Amino acid sequence: MSPGEEKDRLQELTRDLLVPCVQLINAYSNGEEKGGSMDWSDVDQAHESALHAVEDNFDLQKCGVCEQYFVPSLTKCGCR
Ligand SMILES: [Zn+2]
C-alpha cells in the first residue's frame, strides 16, 4: 500500500468510527432538548453504525461469561 493509499484508508476508518460517535452525541443532545427523553430511533441508528464500523474493521467477539462484546487486545469485556 502506498503512503497515499494508507492515508486514505486511515481517513476512511476514522470516519467510519466517528459517525456512530457523532450520532450518539446528537441522540443525547436531542434527548436533553426534549427534557431528558431519548429518541430510540436516534440510538438505534448510532448502534447500527457502530456495529457495522466495528465488525467491518475489527475482530468483535462476545465474552462467554459476562456476554459483553469486546475487541481482543484493544478493549475488555465486563469481567476482565
Ligand atoms: Zn467477560
Image: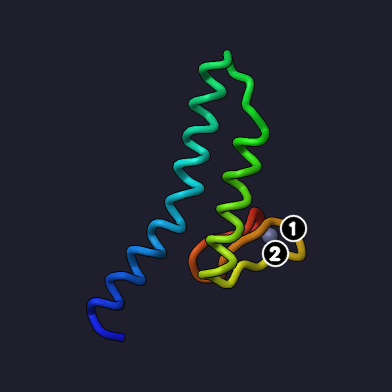
Element carrying mark 1: loop
Image point 46% across, 56% down: which residue?
Answer: 17
Classify mark 1: residues with Cα within 10 Å, few (<14), some (14-19) or many (20+). Answer: few
User: Are the residues tagged 1 and 2 within 8 Å (C-beta)?
Assistant: yes
The C terminus appears in which quarter of the rendering?
bottom right
**Some atom of ligand 1 lies within 8 Å of the CB belonging to the residue at label 1:** yes
Residue sitting at the far left? 3
Left-right relation of 22 to 54: left
- Residue nearest the viewer, comparing 74 with 54: 54
Image point 69% across, 56% down: which residue?
Answer: 68
Image point 46% across, 49% down: which residue?
Answer: 19
Q: Measured from the top left, where is residue 58 in percent x and y?
A: 53, 70
The N terminus appears in which quarter of the rendering?
bottom left
First in residue order: circle 1 vs circle 2: 2
Disc 2 residue type (three-letter): Lys
* Circle number at residue 67: 1
Q: Quadrant of ligand 1?
A: bottom right
- For disc 2, the marked residue is 62
Left-right relation of 18 to 24: left
Q: Is residue 29 above or below residue 45?
A: above
Q: Measured from the top left, where is residue 9 in percent x and y?
A: 36, 71
Image point 57% across, 16% down: which residue?
Answer: 34
Disc 1 residue type (three-letter): Glu
